[in-house]
Image: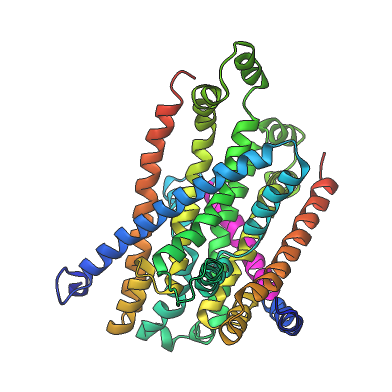
Amino acid sequence: MELLTFGNTGWGDELFYATLMTIVVSITAMLIGFFFALIFTPLKLSNKKFLNFIANSYTTVIRGVPELLVIYLFFFGGSGAIMYVASIFGYFEYIEINAFITGSFAIGIISGAYSTEVFRGAIQSIDKGQFEAAKVLGVKKHIQFFKIIMPQMLRLAIPNLSNVWQITLKDTSLISVTGLVEIMRQSYIAAGSTRDPLLFYSVAALIYLMLTFLSMKLINRLEVKYSRGF
Amino acid sequence: MDFTLMATSLPKLLIAAAVTLKLLSLSLLFGIFIGLLFAILRLNKNPLINKFAYGYSYIFRGTPLLVQIFLIYFGLGQIEYFRSTFLWVVFKEPYWCAIIAFALNTGAYTSEILRSAFQTIKPGIVEAGKSLGVSSKIIFYKIQIPIAIRQSLPAYGNEIILMMKGTSLASTVTLMDITGVAKYIISTSFKPIEVFIVAGGIYLFMTFVIHNIIKFFEKKYSF
């Protein structure tokens, strides 16, 4: 038990910071995912076949390929790609991007594919009459989206987004292979130096359970908030 | 684009695909029994038994698969007593540790899928069986299970695909499945994009095949 105390002799404070890192990476990845969803959901719903094709390939490929493989692609290919782009602009120095950025981008792209599907489903299940009524009343396009479609869409999307959040949170454990010190990596280090893997991986499992439990509680509150009036 | 690298890595990755498929099929086989067992326990009226089944599925669904593999592979070996039992023959192999972790994980998800399938069976069907004098054992095996399987096919298809992606984690415990071999080729050739295209293509093809098999069964068993 003294292995888990805070301070120089225990791993408690290290695990605490690692937990914070996991939370920060998950939130960053989720936000990057929303950003991708914002781009690809309209493409999915568009009338143009070509745009549909782009969005469908994104979601199909990302959801059909293991997360670990995507992370390896970013981990080994990330700085190469950035250096290639930089070389077009005449910058030839070696660029190394840190594990946090690579990791949250890799997980973000995965999470974005799931979010895109959620938003597409939610928008498609909104009654067509809502769009038409807004049009007839002469509501401007962006007001129609933000004030009429979005509130209805969020209510439908939140339960599924909570699943996406759970997936994203658990996927961040895979970034440990790139060396970013989050819960899994920290437990690996601690298990290696104390030769007590059973204890540290059990603690890691408990921390993840706690995180999923707490986020469920929070999301349930949001759900109640957004389903007011229904 | 290095097409020769893609051509030479394809056969290596296809051999690795056999490992992935073996891991997948064995864990699904064990997982379905675990899932069925826990789904039945979940529906038990005794609160102690169904709380236990709920706890099992909650823990395995609430923690990352990576933690589960590491706990089983690195963690269990630490227990002195455990190493002296006959179980150690199985648990010292990373191959079986991975399969056990996958099976326990997919079992938790499968139990949830089957439970909800059992719960959506209309009580009238069971009552009709009872009023015809069919024994409750036969009602369960011949009426409830076939209907539950049909109900859960779409969700189970998704679970198979998720599990197939999950088997990539076997590469973290030294197994050379598709992802393991892909990582090895990437780290020796420094050409991540080419290898990703080939390895990802194999995974996508497998997803495509699984998806169509499930669709076929859905059609066959639809009513």
Residues A147 and B199: in front is A147
**Residue B46 point in image, percent of width and height:** 46, 46
Judge from the rendering whether residue A131 lies leftward or rightward of residue A167; answer left or right.
Answer: right
Rendered position, A25 above or below A164: below
Residue A146 belongs to the span the image colors magenta: no
Residues A154 and A190: in front is A154
**Residue B198 point in image, percent of width and height:** 71, 73
Q: Which colour scheme is used?
A: rainbow
Question: Which residue is at 37% across, 34% downward?
Answer: A221
Q: Quadrant of residue B177?
A: bottom right
- The range drawn in magenta is B21-42
Task: For residue A81, say whether it is visible.
Answer: yes
Judge from the rendering whether residue A149 lies leftward or rightward of residue B76; answer left or right.
Answer: right
Task: For residue B150, say whether it is visible.
Answer: no
**Residue B82 point in image, percent of width and height:** 41, 82
Residue B23 belongs to the span the image colors magenta: yes
Query: What quarter of the picture does the N terminus of chain A occupy?
Result: bottom left
Farthest residue to the top: give it: A137
Callout count: 0
Question: Which secondary structure dominates the residues rendered in magenta?
Answer: helix
Residues B148 and B61: in front is B61
Judge from the rendering whether residue A70 lies leftward or rightward of residue B55; answer left or right.
Answer: right
Rendered position, B162 above or below B131: below
